[in-house]
Amino acid sequence: MAALFEVSKNAAVAVAACDDARLFLWRLPQKEVMRRIDLAGQSIDALAISPDGSLIAAGDHSGSHSVWETSTGERKLDLRTSFYPFRLAFSPDSKQLAIAAVGQPVRIYKVETTESARVGRPH
């Protein structure tokens, strides 16, 4: 059963984080399963897909965040925060990932370099 579900803004790719600790990716509108990504037991709390459908980000309760390429399933990035994610979002150009961890400042990471910048505190 899917716990979280996202569709890219261009409606080309959909992703579901499932209760069996796997991500399922579909090619749309064909409704074809592109791939399955094993999460090695992680329980996902937040999920995002880039606007162009090329990247998927997921974060779990331990503060682990990962980014995968949808075309290959290759993990591009692993990040660690001290708290679990409330929300994840990609920039319109898919080059940055914003992580809003519970009770922490929002941070924006460059997907290619993991360079971060403090953006602000939640209210």
Image (tube, rainbow, N blue to C red):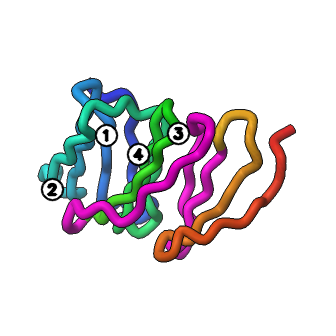
Q: Is residue 36 above or below residue 112?
A: above
Q: Secondary structure at mark 2?
A: strand
As drawn, the label of residue 63 is 3
The alpha-carbon separation of the residues under discs 2 and 3 comes to: 27 Å
As drawn, the label of residue 34 is 2
The alpha-carbon separation of the residues under discs 2 and 4 comes to: 15 Å
Task: Estimate the x, y position of residue 14 in percent, counting from the top left.
Answer: 31, 50
As drawn, the label of residue 6 is 4
Q: Looking at numbered disc 1 in the image, what kind of residue is underneath it?
A: Ala
Mark in front: 4 vs 3: 3
Q: Residue 24: within the magenta?
A: no
Q: Secondary structure at mark 4?
A: strand
Q: Which residues are magenta?
A: 71-100
Q: Quadrant of the C terminus?
A: top right
Give the mark nearest the N terminus, 1 or 4.
Answer: 4
Q: Nearest the camera: 28 or 59? A: 59
For this view, does 16 lie left or right of residue 67?
left
Q: Nearest the camera: 38 or 1? A: 38
Residue reaching furthest to the right: 123
Q: Secondary structure at mark 3?
A: loop
The alpha-carbon separation of the residues under discs 1 and 4 comes to: 7 Å
Q: Is residue 50 above or below residue 20?
A: below
Q: Residues within 10 Å of mark 1 (few under 14, many from 20)?
A: many
Mark in front: 2 vs 3: 3
Mark 4 touches mark 3? (CB < 8 Å): no
The residue lying at 40 percent from left, 45 percent from top is 6
Q: Residues within 10 Å of mark 2 (few under 14, many from 20)?
A: some
Q: Can the viewer see residue 21? A: yes
